[in-house]
Image: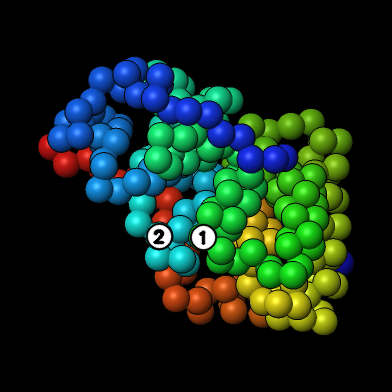
Amino acid sequence: MPLLKQRPHHTKATDHFRYLSLSPTESTYPFSSIKKKIPMQLFGSTDSGHSYKVRSFLLLTNTPHDYQWVDLSNKPSAFLAISPFGEVPVLLDQGRIFCQSNAILIYLAQRSGQFTGGEEWQGALEWLSWEANRIGFSLPNYRFALHWQPQPPEVMRYLQQRVLADLNTLNEKLAVREFLLKSGLSIADISCSAYLFWLDQIGVDVADYPNIKRWLAAICQLPGWCHPNEAMKRIPNPD
């Protein structure tokens, strides 16, 4: 073993838009207007793998959308007005607000009919639940503790052990199939892989997990795929 160096939530957005004080042609940093010609808007941030899940789905399905970068160190009141929990990601679609990354993935899959897993829909949902409680918890928290907010040694060891256990689980499951479901790529893969493109940031060599390495390489070859460093970078508003 290598050592390391809920359900969809949506509300009507109509009452919140007045806080943005924007017309369809106006913009204010860091948000551009709620554009009628682009029905979806995704609010996310650079280091958020949870935001990247949603952005990745939209890119892989070639879904028209407007990505809005949010400064998490100084969240604008306009963003907080439309974010039920004050977190990213938030998706606006046809006047409705959706939050929590896996819940958004469920909505998008059902809305588009893509990456649902087909008859394995229940399996996709089970993987989303696993992700939220395992790799989607352990890896981002360990990464955050390593780079931004150090924790006591016993907490660091706990998170490290959780990450290793979760990587081993994924590696074992992927030994018998190309993707997490027999039917092929689904929201299960989009969710569970999101933070794994940053394994180097927690001192993990993906080569130590050959099945995960193959899986990530297959995802990278998909039309529309984009690395999180590029997909989630800050996009300055035009003057």
Question: Is the C terminus in the top left, top right, bottom left or bottom right quadrant?
Answer: top left
Position of 69 relative to 58 (above/below): above
Q: How many marks?
A: 2
> Mark 2 — residue?
63
Whether pointer 2 and pointer 1 mark residues with C-beta atoms closer than 8 Å, the reply is yes
- Residue at image location 79% in from the left, 62% down from the top: 123
Instruction: Residue at 51%, 60% (x, y): give it.
Output: 112
**Taking 1 as reference, is 76 left or right?**
left
Compared across the picture, whether 198 is left or right of 230 comes to right
Q: Is residue 8 visible?
A: yes
Q: Residues within 10 Å of mark 2 (few under 14, many from 20)?
A: some
The disc at residue 112 is: 1
Query: Is residue 213 found left or right of 28 in the rendered image?
Result: right
> Where is the N terminus found, in terms of image quarters?
bottom right
Which residue is at a point 43% across and 42% down the rendered structure image?
Answer: 93
Q: State the separation of the CA atoms marked 2 and 1.
A: 9 Å
User: Tag 1 or tag 2, which sits nearer the N-term?
Assistant: 2
Q: Position of residue 56 (x, y in %)?
A: 50, 59
Callout 1: few (<14), some (14-19), or many (20+) C-alpha neighbours within 10 Å?
Answer: few
92 versus 210 height, above or below? above
Percent coordinates x, y for residue 19 in the rendering: 34, 17
